[in-house]
Image: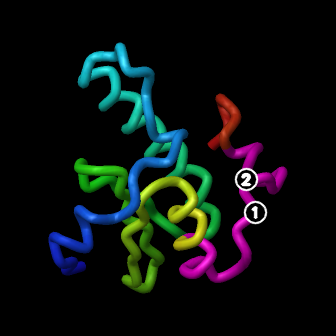
């Protein structure tokens, strides 16, 4: 996917859920960001979507199995992109999806 650097960098700021407490060192914020990306990936996997983190800004790349992808800046944009790319409506509170997130399930 090719994106103009201005469009990429001028996307909306972080969602409140993307922020780590201000006193945390950069390394800890990176670990938290990676953990959130893995969780988003697990939630969206049942819908045939992947989530990747380009590593800068609040952006995540949401992609489907057909090669379509969208850059999402912040959590609200992730859900909007998922709704557009998924083959069926995304329901993050679906019991089946939540059960896959439990420890020991897989």
Q: Position of residue 42 (x, y in %)?
A: 56, 50
In 3D space, how far apart are the residues under numbered discs 1 and 2 (Cα atoms)? 8 Å
Which residue range is magenta in the image? 82-100
User: Which residue: 37% across, 83% down?
Assistant: 67
Q: Position of residue 74 (x, y in %)?
A: 46, 55
Q: Quadrant of residue 20?
A: top left
- Whether the magenta-drawn stretch holds residue 96 is answered as yes
- Image disc number at residue 97: 2
User: Which residue: 73% across, 75% down?
Assistant: 89
Q: Is residue 56 above or below residue 65?
A: above
Nearer to us of marks 1 and 2 is 1
Label 1 crowding class (10 Å Cα cut-off): few <14, some 14-19, many 20+?
some
- Whether the magenta-drawn stretch holds residue 53 is answered as no
Q: Position of residue 31 (x, y in %)?
A: 35, 28
- Quarter in which the N terminus is drawn: bottom left
In the current view of this chain or complex, which residue is farthest to the left? 5
Mark earlier in primary sequence (1, 2): 1
- Quarter in which the C terminus is drawn: top right
Helix, strand or loop at label 1? It is: loop
Q: Quadrant of residue 90?
A: bottom right
Q: Camera-side residue: 11 or 30?
A: 11
Q: Position of residue 48 (x, y in %)?
A: 56, 71
User: Which residue: 38% across, 21% down?
Assistant: 22
Q: Is residue 59 left or right of residue 21?
A: left
- Image disc number at residue 91: 1
User: Which residue: 17% across, 78% down?
Assistant: 4
């Amino acid at each position: 996917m090719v994106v103009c650097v201005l469009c990429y960098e001028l996307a909306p700021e972080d969602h409140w859920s993307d922020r780590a407490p201000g006193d945390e060192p950069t390394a800890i914020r990176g670990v938290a960001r990676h953990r959130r990306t893995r969780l988003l990936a697990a939630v969206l996997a049942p819908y045939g979507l992947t989530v990747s983190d380009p590593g800068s800004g609040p952006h995540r790349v949401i992609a489907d199995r057909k090669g379509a992808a969208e850059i999402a800046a912040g959590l609200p944009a992730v859900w909007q992109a998922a709704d557009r790319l998924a083959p069926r409506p995304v329901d993050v509170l679906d019991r089946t999806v939540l059960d896959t997130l439990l420890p020991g399930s897989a």
